[in-house]
Every structure is written in structure tokens, then in C-alpha cells.
């Protein structure tokens, strides 16, 4: 399904929204999983000199659920689409999705809006030159 580009204004370079997710109510209640993710993304944002605009979270929600069933993830993507931020940062790629199709759908939606996705665990960084060169190869 193709979604039209919805970005209404260009986000400032280096502006970030973060997305945090834990699967179980127990993890959500303890806060440990969310705190660890928050610490990881904060460290990466600081290291890169970026500016945090907003944090979105889904607590006690499985990563296998559809994007539309996760209000925090929807909010983070919409922040990129609206031009509120240019970068979506997560601690690990499995916070976005538990299967490749869903992960690629999230990345595609963010990129179509002119944003990038970065996972602190280095499994995803669509802002890198390597990604740009692969895109050129795929387009050839």
C-alpha cells in the first residue's frame, strides 16, 4: 500500500523523537526496560549532538502488533511526517517491530516523509552514506 508523502514542513536537522517499548505489563510497571532504553537513546542523542523533541512509548505492547495498534509508534512516525522532527531513534530495532516486513514498513514510512531511523544498537541507521550508496545501486 502506497501512502502519499504527508510532510508539511521540513524538520530541523538533528531534531529527534524517540520511541520506547516494552512487551509486558510487568516490564512497564517496573520501569527497568523503559529506563534502560531511555538511557541508551539519550546517550546516543547527546553523543551525536542532536536535540530531543519528544519521546513516545508503548508500555506492555507486543512488537508483533500492527503499527496502527501501537499509539506511541504512530505518534513517533506522525512527528516525522509532520516535520516536528527529522530522526526517529530507538534503542534496538526490535523495539520497532518483531518481523522484517513490519520493520521495513516503518522505515519506508519514515523515509518517505524525509526522515531517518536510527537504532542505538547499530542494527539500523538510514542516515549513513552506506545506505545512500545501496539505494543508488538498487535504483540502477
Image: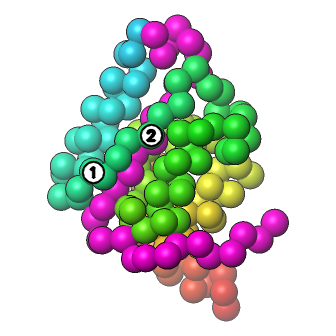
State the separation of the CA atoms marked 1 and 2: 11 Å
Q: Is residue 129 visible?
A: no
Q: Is residue 24 magenta?
A: yes
Residue at numbered disc 2:
56
Q: Look at the picture and state if 110 lies above or below 33.
A: below
The residue carrying pointer 1 sits among few (fewer than 14), some (14 to 19) or many (20 or more) residues within 10 Å by Cα, namely some
Q: Residue at x 52, y 8 (%)?
A: 26
* Image quadrant occupied by the C terminus: bottom right
The residue carrying pointer 2 sits among few (fewer than 14), some (14 to 19) or many (20 or more) residues within 10 Å by Cα, namely some
Residue at numbered disc 1:
52
Q: How many marks?
A: 2
Q: Look at the picture and state if 70 lies above or below 52.
A: above
Q: Residue at x 70, y 37 (%)?
A: 69
Magenta region, residue range: 1-29
Q: Where does residue 2 sit, x and y in percent of width and height? A: 77, 71
Which quadrant of the view contains residue 127? bottom left
Amino acid at each position: 500500500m502506497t501512502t502519499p508523502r504527508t510532510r508539511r514542513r521540513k524538520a530541523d536537522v538533528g531534531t529527534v523523537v524517540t520511541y520506547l517499548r516494552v512487551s509486558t505489563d510487568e516490564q512497564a510497571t517496573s520501569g527497568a526496560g523503559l529506563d534502560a532504553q531511555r538511557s541508551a537513546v539519550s546517550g546516543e542523542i547527546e553523543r551525536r549532538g542532536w536535540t530531543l523533541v519528544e519521546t513516545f512509548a508503548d508500555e506492555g505492547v507486543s512488537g508483533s502488533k500492527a503499527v496502527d495498534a501501537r499509539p506511541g509508534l504512530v505518534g513517533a512516525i506522525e512527528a516525522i511526517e509532520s516535520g516536528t522532527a527529522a530522526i526517529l531513534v530507538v534503542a534496538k530495532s526490535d523495539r520497532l517491530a518483531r518481523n522484517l516486513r513490519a520493520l521495513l514498513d516503518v522505515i519506508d514510512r519514515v523515509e518517505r516523509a524525509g526522515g531517518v531511523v536510527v537504532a542505538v544498537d547499530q542494527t539500523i541507521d538510514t542516515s549513513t552514506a552506506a545506505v545512500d550508496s545501496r539505494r543508488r545501486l538498487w535504483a540502477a
